[in-house]
Amino acid sequence: MPLLYVTDLAYPARGRRYGDEDVFLTSRLREEFPLALCHPLDARALMPGFDAVIVRNSGPVLHHQEAYDAFRAHALATGARVYNPLTGRADMAGKQYLLDLTRSGHPVIPTVDDPADLHLLPQVAEYAVKPRQGADSIGLAFTADPAAHLAQQGAAPGSLLVQPRIDFVHEVSFYFVDDAFQYALYAPDPDRRWDLEPYEPSPADLDFARTFIGWNTLTHGIQRVDACRAPSGELLLVELEDLNPYLSLELLPEPVRDAFVNALVASLRSFLG
């Protein structure tokens, strides 16, 4: 079953080496599947010749939104198999999930998109304002007066999200294949997001992460649950990445990396039937 692996090997990701990770992953997957690589701008045209498409380190969709929308529409219209499946409710569908999870009382950084709802956020010295369709910190701004900032931006209603800026202890990411936890990494220094180290999660940490994996209801795929630890000790969701999460595989001990690849191969075999 030939697979089309979508990646942008040259994308200049800050603190990450997309190309290196995908060269490694494709070298391992090629041992199990016939496989070809393509740039995200070419995925729509090339996908009919393959049994399935794997979307990996292809950069923020907003850099090629028109091409991605055409790819997604074609895949949905033709029933093409895409991994991760396009039914994800988190980042692949935009940032609406942060609003939904806030309203449902999940442990997430409180998020609103309406100036009339700013009073629902905790009072802090500074707030983060980000585009609903943003990624990779593009368009992120900090302000002490979010109401004035929103008014100055003149953005369309609902196009910007507002969150309290939390003085967190550290960020931690949990990596899953399907619903199975694989490993965790954390950034001890809050100012150095991609200086990651291995992290041994507690049972409570894993319960937290699995809450969001269950909420997303993806039967197959790679997901990364990004969280921050508040000064009081609890974890809060920052992002649920279900489109093309970077995996930081180069930081893993070889047995953990091999176990991840084996889990991915098993997931793909199950997905392909």
Image (cartoon, helix red, strand yellow):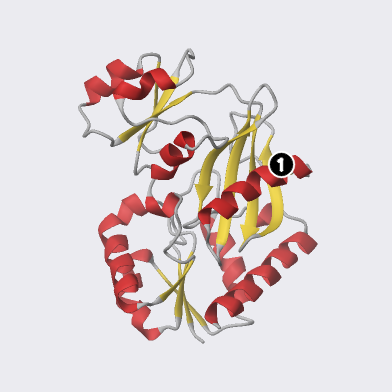
Residue at 79% in and 63% down:
255
Residue 267 shown left or right of residue 253 in the figure: left
Residue 174 in view, yes or no: yes
Residue at 63% in and 60% down:
179
The image quadrant that residue 214 belongs to is bottom right
Note whether 212 is above or below 55 in the view shown: above
Residue at 60% in and 68% down:
25
The image quadrant that residue 139 belongs to is top left
Note whether 261 is above or below 143 in the view shown: below
Q: Give residue 254's position: percent from left, percent from top.
A: 77, 62
User: Which amino acid type is marked by label 1?
Assistant: Asp
Q: How many labels does the image show?
A: 1
Note whether 172 is above or below 212 in the view shown: above
Q: Give residue 10's position: percent from left, percent from top.
A: 44, 58
Give the residue pinned by disc 1.
205
Residue at 60% in and 78% down:
270
| Crowding at mark 1 (Cα within 10 Å: few <14, some 14-19, many 20+) | some
Asked whether 17 or 30 is in front, the reply is 30
Residue 201 in view, yes or no: no
Q: Give residue 120's position: percent from left, percent from top.
A: 42, 21
